[in-house]
Image: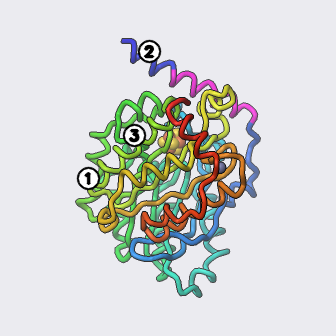
């Protein structure tokens, strides 16, 4: 009974903060609804090589878990959402706008590409992305030979065999991964601290179906959820990476927690009850969780939002210290080689402060 009350309290607090933040939100104009939130191309680790990735963030009504319930404790994505219905043609226009700007660059590049479509919710939720929009997107991607890999994100409750079959019909020559926010393999951390409303069993049922259909899975892990200290988050991350590698997950993407607007994590951070993770903790997790041979079966990704800033993963306030760590992380990801994490020329003095703080906050 006690834990049920705790859960309700957390959920209510998240909903209250979100509502307050959304009260200040301006309505998007028609022009804004015809353009994506953002899109860019950058260097990225593809399955077997270093290549490029185009990311397109679409503006939909937003994630149902955040809109119809309370949402996850670290998430502020709904701030970018329209909240009200967005016409399917507008979402098609957003996608086309981004792709049309970048298509010549992709077609003329000698690199292979991955395409990542974010809608800060679920690609297979028809209230966000209609069937007609999904089919339009599939058709356009299928016509671009340089795009070899694609990621669509979704909560597991929207995955079903018919939707996957339909997707495969259009994209049979591409490698597809479905991105699922599991955040942690620990049910308690995921549901009591993150408020994800997802059990590991339910996740594994979805994994079975996805793998049976020969589709890949990318799992997102949240590094340092609220209510865990640095050591707790290292332990959670190691346990999660090991378990997911054993479960034949194709890609594990680690997201160091950052302070997003309107989230419970932001409120804790303002009260000095939460600090985003240190790079040292993230590197220790990688070193302890992974062995050289693991990289033959799993790809590890990590591209932290707000890296080096107060709201993102950071060490001390020294620009050099954070830039150095970021460079090591980037090279580790691009090469999938743990040795890259040890290539630091010197160690910053903040390491000593970190060692003391590690078990405290
Ligand atoms: S993290 Fe994902 S599932 Fe959770 S509220 Fe945000 S968009 Fe929705
Ligand atoms: Zn430092």
How far separated are the C-alphas under marks 3 and 2?
A: 27 Å
Q: Which residue is mark 1?
A: 247
Nearer to us in this view, 29 or 151? 151
Q: Tag 1: Cα neighbours inside 10 Å, few (<14), some, or many (≥20)?
A: few
- In the picture, the disc for residue 235 is 3
Earlier in the chain: of badge 3 and badge 2, it is: 2
The percent position of residue 168, horizontal first and vertical second, equals: 34, 67
x then y, percent, for residue 37? 66, 56
Horizontal placement of 160 versus 226: left or right? left
The residue wearing badge 2 is: 5
Dot 3 alpha-carbon crowd within 10 angstroms: few under 14, some 14 to 19, many 20 or more = some
Residue 129 location in percent, x, y? 51, 53
Residue 164 lies, with reference to residue 103, above or below; the image says: above
Depicted 153 relative to depicted 186: above or below? below
Res 97 visible: yes
Quarter occupied by residue 85: top right
3 and 2 marks in contact (CB < 8 Å): no
Quadrant placement of the C terminus: top right
Q: Is residue 64 visible?
A: no
Q: Which mark is residue 190?
A: none
Q: Nearer the viewer, mark 3 or mark 1?
A: 3
Q: Please tell me whether mark 2 or mark 1 is closer to you in this view.
A: 1
Determine whether, in the image, residue 344 is placed left or right of residue 174: right
Q: Nearer the viewer, residue 28 or 147?
A: 147
Q: CA distance from mark 3 to mark 1?
A: 18 Å
Q: Is residue 5 above or below residue 358?
A: above
């Amino acid at each position: 009974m006690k834990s049920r009350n705790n859960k309700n309290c957390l959920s209510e607090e998240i909903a209250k903060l979100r509502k307050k933040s959304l009260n200040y939100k301006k309505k998007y104009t028609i022009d804004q609804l015809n353009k994506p939130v953002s899109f860019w191309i950058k260097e990225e680790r593809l399955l077997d090589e270093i290549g490029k990735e185009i990311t397109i963030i679409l503006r939909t009504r937003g994630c149902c878990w955040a809109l119809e319930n309370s949402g996850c404790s670290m998430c502020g994505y709904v701030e970018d959402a329209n909240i009200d219905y967005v016409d399917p043609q507008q979402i098609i226009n957003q996608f086309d706008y981004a792709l049309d700007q970048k298509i010549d660059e992709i077609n003329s590049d000698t690199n292979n590409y991955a395409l990542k479509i974010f809608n800060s919710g679920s690609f297979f939720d028809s209230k966000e992305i209609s069937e007609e929009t999904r089919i339009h997107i599939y058709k356009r991607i299928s016509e671009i030979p340089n795009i070899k890999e694609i990621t669509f994100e979704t909560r597991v409750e929207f995955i079903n065999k018919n939707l996957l079959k339909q997707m495969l019909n259009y994209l049979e020559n591409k490698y597809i991964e479905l991105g699922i926010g599991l955040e942690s393999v620990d049910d308690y951390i995921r549901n009591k601290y993150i408020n994800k409303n997802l059990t590991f069993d339910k996740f594994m049922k979805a994994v079975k179906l996805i793998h049976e259909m020969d589709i890949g899975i990318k799992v997102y892990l949240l590094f340092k959820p609220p209510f865990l200290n640095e050591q707790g988050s290292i332990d959670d991350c190691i346990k999660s990476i090991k378990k997911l590698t054993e479960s034949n997950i194709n890609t594990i993407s680690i997201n160091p927690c950052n302070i997003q607007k309107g989230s419970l994590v932001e409120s804790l951070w303002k009260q000095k009850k939460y600090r985003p993770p240190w790079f040292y903790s993230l590197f220790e997790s990688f070193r302890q969780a992974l062995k050289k041979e693991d990289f033959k079966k799993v790809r590890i990704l990590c591209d932290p939002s707000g890296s080096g800033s107060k709201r993102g993963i950071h060490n001390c306030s020294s620009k050099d210290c954070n830039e150095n760590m970021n460079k090591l992380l980037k090279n580790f990801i691009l090469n999938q080689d743990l040795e890259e994490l040890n290539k630091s020329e010197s160690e910053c003095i903040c390491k000593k402060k970190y060692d003391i703080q590690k078990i405290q906050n």
